Image (spheres, rainbow, N blue to C red):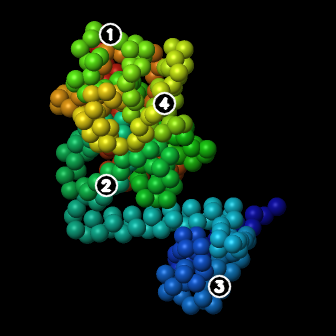
């Protein structure tokens, strides 16, 4: 049976303004507002949308009391429209960079625990490509994957396991994550030789939101020690908020990656508490959307990350 999605047929009938309209309708929920955004009359927008649905052989929106809502096919079409728009934007940026002799631009995301790793790799990248422009976005894995889906990030250091569709991504494991507990230098446990989770029962925890990998790791530690998980938590995904909270309150503790703990302790911001954790978190991956165009600088960034991983694996384990 011949597929209704013949590539030559679709390419010959698809227009950039239709894709812009598709994205606008999804964002506005209104054909009139979408038409105004892309510079069409409402009848013109209605005709363009019908032509697009005919080209793709599927209804893309349904009318509800909340306005126009994408169908399953519409959601798929909107995602690819955004990717096409993003690829054209990247084309424009790279052509401008070639014309000006500059090094172009990449946008990279990172979860909090991988910030030190990414900054070390980017330092090496900028030594190799001094004219490169870089955008760094720090957020949760879930949010970073959404930005990759939308074409707003070239790649991110996070975890694909939080996605219901991990097959959409190309992934490279760049580091096994180990964890540490940090606190204000005046925390009662800061000067002890060793402690247990029970010793922190009077402390208040700064943690990630529920269902996130690092939070699950901490919950598992409490479960295995037959301890109740703390209440009255402070939840944040911000490294700066975490450090600011710890610096102002000696009773707070936080679970962070070893890399983050090393960095902030070296700079005297906080203290690492002598708690030996049994669990290891999931490894960091550098994630990009599958089979997407790869900026040459991204290849160099991957090389830097893998080189840093090799150095870390060769280093002797801490006593």
Image quarter for residue 69?
bottom right
Quadrant housing the C terminus: top left
Residue under numbered circle 1: 194
Of marks 2 and 1, the one in the foreground: 1
Q: Is residue 218 visible?
A: yes
Q: Reading the chain from its start, which is encountered first: label 4 or label 1? A: 1
Q: Tell me the CA gap for discs 2 and 3.
A: 37 Å
Find numbered disc 4 in the image and state the secondary structure of the residue it sits on: loop
What x and y, as percent, mark residue 6?
69, 68
What x and y, as percent, mark residue 134?
28, 54
Residue under numbered circle 3: 46
Query: Within 10 angstroms of label 1, few (less than 14), some, or many (20 or more) residues?
Result: few
Residue found at x 26% / y 57%: 133
In this view of the protein, which residue sits in the foreground, 75 or 300? Answer: 75
Determine whether 232 is above or below 123 in the image.
above
Q: Tell me the CA gap for discs 4 and 1.
A: 24 Å
The reply to whether callout 3 and callout 1 are in contact (CB within 8 Å) is: no
Q: Reading the chain from its start, which is encountered first: label 4 or label 3? A: 3
The reply to whether callout 4 and callout 2 are in contact (CB within 8 Å) is: no
Query: Within 10 angstroms of label 3, few (less than 14), some, or many (20 or more) residues?
Result: some
In this view of the protein, which residue sits in the foreground, 272 or 101? Answer: 272
Of marks 3 and 1, the one in the foreground: 1
Q: Tell me the CA gap for discs 4 and 2.
A: 37 Å
What x and y, as percent, mark residue 129?
23, 50
Of marks 4 and 2, the one in the foreground: 4
Q: Which mark is residue 231?
A: 4
Q: Reading the chain from its start, which is encountered first: label 2 or label 1? A: 2
Q: Tell me the CA gap for discs 2 and 1.
A: 41 Å
Q: Which mark is residue 135?
A: 2
Residue found at x 41% / y 53%: 154
Q: Tell me the CA gap for discs 4 and 3.
A: 53 Å
In this view of the protein, which residue sits in the foreground, 2 or 249? Answer: 249
């Amino acid at each position: 049976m011949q597929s209704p999605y013949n590539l030559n047929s679709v390419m010959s009938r698809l227009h950039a303004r239709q894709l812009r309209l598709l994205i606008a309708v999804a964002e506005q929920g209104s054909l009139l507002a979408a038409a105004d955004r892309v510079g069409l009359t409402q009848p013109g927008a209605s005709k363009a949308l019908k032509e697009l649905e005919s080209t793709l052989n599927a209804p893309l929106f349904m009318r509800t009391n909340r306005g126009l809502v994408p169908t399953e096919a519409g959601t798929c079409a909107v995602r690819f429209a955004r990717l096409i728009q993003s690829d054209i934007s990247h084309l424009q940026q790279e052509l401008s960079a070639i014309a000006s002799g500059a090094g172009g631009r990449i946008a990279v995301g990172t979860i909090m625990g991988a910030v030190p790793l990414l900054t070390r790799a980017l330092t090496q990248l900028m030594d190799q490509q001094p004219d490169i422009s870089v955008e760094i976005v720090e957020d949760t894995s879930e949010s970073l994957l959404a930005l990759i889906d939308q074409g707003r990030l070239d790649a991110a250091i996070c975890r694909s396991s939080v996605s219901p569709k991990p097959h959409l991504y190309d992934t490279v494991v760049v580091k096994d994550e180990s964890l540490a507990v940090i606190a204000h230098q005046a925390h009662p446990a800061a000067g002890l030789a060793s402690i247990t989770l029970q010793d922190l029962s009077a402390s208040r925890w700064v943690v990630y939101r529920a269902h996130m990998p690092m939070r699950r790791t901490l919950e598992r530690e409490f479960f295995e020690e037959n301890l109740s998980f703390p209440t009255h938590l402070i939840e944040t995904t911000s490294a700066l908020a975490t450090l600011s909270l710890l610096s102002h309150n000696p009773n707070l503790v936080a679970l962070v990656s070893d890399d983050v703990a090393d960095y902030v302790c070296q700079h005297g911001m906080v203290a690492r508490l002598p708690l030996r954790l049994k669990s290891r978190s999931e490894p960091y991956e550098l994630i990009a959307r599958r089979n997407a165009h790869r900026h040459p600088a991204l290849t160099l960034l991957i090389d830097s990350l893998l080189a840093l991983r090799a150095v870390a694996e060769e280093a002797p384990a801490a006593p």
